[in-house]
Amino acid sequence: MCERKCVLPNGVTGVCGNYVNTSGVLYHRGYGRLSAIESRPIEIKPLYHYWPGSTALTYSNYGCNFYCPWCQNDHLSFVKPSGSEEYIPPEKLVELAVLKGDEGLSASFNEPLTNLDYVVDATEIAVKHGLYSMMVTNMYFTVKSLKTVLDAGVDGFSADIKGCPQMKRALVGVDHEVVFRNARIALDHGAHVEIVYLVVTNTNDFKECYEWIISKHLDYLGLEAPLHVNRYHPAHRWREPPTPISKLLEIREYALQQGLKYVYVGNTWNPDYESTKCPRCGKTLIYRSGYRVLDFKLDSSSGRYKCPRCGEVIPIKGRYVEKHFY
């Protein structure tokens, strides 16, 4: 299922707790045992260039294949399913999304990879109902698993890059380049990818680390794939102070100097850093505040989204959905 490639003796579960070997047969005991279901704006994922303004019925199960000691969803990610939790069939999930008026599904909160075959089943049903399907994920898939969800119809990924090879304090056994390898495969299959870099104080915030991350972003994904440089706040077992705004802006400035066209700074509640500006002329094209699109000025008359001032093509997957929130 994932790059850990757990080999399970009889009666043993993998790291995430969802898959168990019972007498030589692999069972997914967490299938459809959902921990949360909630309609949420796509911008909160964050995805800024994918179905802007839309909402997705967001769902999660239990477990994770990583252990991030700063996890904000540890009550879901670090709980292993028992099999006794309420079962929600994928058909019911899609019915609920349609009923709520959501444009798509989002597998999120914990690592969706731990619920992979459920995500595939829900996605195939969602696509038949004209809904999109996306994932908020650490992107630590095997290539086979990634292609399985792509073939099912998942076409949006908010992909977390946790760090770099030089990290010493956490996630030291993770091959972080796998995230970029898989992001490239997803792009090549026509999916949309945005990279999310949570900058954790005194952990993955040093110069060699952010230079490595941005270098790999450029090598694998190019100049147009959006990068979110997000602020960390203490959670779970990590008590380092929140990321200084100056550090986030330092990384943003470096990324822009390297040629990235779309670099956002998140978790600071500053609309100037959340809004999309034309990389050619600087015009504000999508104004966001509080994970909501408040103004959308892209010209779509040609069938592609363009800056109305200079004609620069802005990469957007899906359509803009204008919703009013009260």
Image (spheres, rainbow, N blue to C red):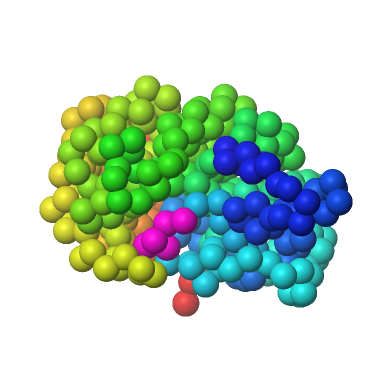
Return the x and y of residue 295 as percentages of the image width and height: 38, 56
Q: Residue furthest bottom?
A: 326
User: For this rendering, which residue is in front, 191 or 281?
Assistant: 191
Residue at (77% x, 60% y) in the render: 29
Residue at (68% x, 31% y) in the render: 144
In the image, 84: left or right of 199? right
In the image, 223: left or right of 301? left
- Quadrant containing the N terminus is top right
User: For this rendering, which residue is in front, 154 or 29?
Assistant: 29
The relative height of residue 79 versus residue 52 in the rendered view (above or below) is below
The relative height of residue 207 versus residue 229 in the rendered view (above or below) is above
Return the x and y of residue 303 as percentages of the image width and height: 55, 32
The relative height of residue 72 versus residue 171 in the rendered view (above or below) is below
User: For this rendering, which residue is in front, 173 or 54?
Assistant: 173
Residue segment shown in magenta? 67-71
Quadrant housing residue 2: top right
How many numbered marks does the figure carry?
0
- Let me know if residue 62 appears in the view: yes
- Let me know if residue 190 appears in the view: no
Return the x and y of residue 258 as percentages of the image width and height: 23, 27
Q: Is residue 243 shown in magenta?
A: no
Residue at (60% x, 53% y) in the render: 15
